[in-house]
Amino acid sequence: MVTTSGDVRFSDELEQWLESDPQKTFGEMIDVFEERGFAVAVVLGLSVPALPLPTGGVSHAFEVIALVAAVQMVLGRTTLWLPRRLRERELGDVLACKVLPFLVRRVRWLEEHTRPRGAVLFGNPWFMRLLGVVLVALTIATAVAPPFSGLDTLPALGGVVVALAILIESLVLLVAGLLIGTGGVVLIVTLGAALARLLRDVF
């Protein structure tokens, strides 16, 4: 188990967890990070579709985990619950060996260059519920983006940044995540509408 303290940075905790137990499951992650499990689940769940690479249907399993966590944030739960099947799901080599080490480096950079702001807001249950609504919307936008189109990247990345803002308690990072995610949703809607008009004209 990872020991925590007010002086330990999230990036250090994440790195320590990655280097500890060989078995990495979402259930273990929840047990380790406790009340922060919601944001951590969203980060991990949206990290795969946030990659600028075609992931096809593989990313949908992780999106489900992000969606389950975000919905529970909206409901105001204080501990994250996952179905047994999801709790026992292993992170896999892509997350454990590639995505998470990359994420640790980026989070550490953010922690060094971003000062915590808005701790009072992030400690407000209703504000967190509102952020849960935002994360639900971004996760759904990620899931409905056409496969192999790359359009899921921006809303997923926006969700990751919003979740990191919660972990770091940074309003600046939160605004950045909202802008990225909103841009991604607008792009999906705009291109989707254009495609619908094109198909209507053709047929």
Image (cartoon, rainbow, N blue to C red):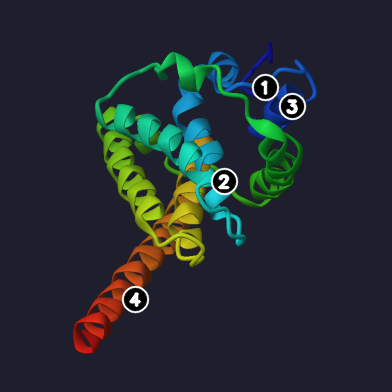
What residue is rendered at 39% in x and 35% in y? 122
Rendered image: mark on residue 24: 1
Write down the quadrant of residue 194 in the picture: bottom left
Q: Amino acid at mark 1?
A: Lys
Q: CA distance from mark 4 to mark 2?
A: 23 Å
Q: Are marks 3 and 2 in contact (CB under 8 Å)?
A: no
What residue is rendered at 51% in x and 55% in y? 157
* Residue neighbourhood size for the residue with mark 4, other residues' Cα within 10 Å, grouped as few (<14), some (14–19), many (≥20): few
Mark 4 or 2, nearer chain start: 2
Identify the secondary structure beneath mark 2: helix
Rendered image: mark on residue 191: 4
Q: Is residue 47 visible?
A: yes
Q: Position of residue 71 (x, y in %)?
A: 30, 32
Is residue 192 shown left or right of residue 180?
left
Q: Nearer the viewer, mark 3 or mark 1?
A: 1
Q: CA distance from mark 1 to mark 2?
A: 16 Å
Q: Amino acid at mark 3?
A: Leu
Q: Are marks 3 and 1 in contact (CB under 8 Å)?
A: yes
Q: CA distance from mark 3 to mark 2?
A: 16 Å
Q: Amino acid at mark 2?
A: Ser
Q: Which residue is mark 3?
A: 18
Q: Amino acid at mark 4?
A: Leu
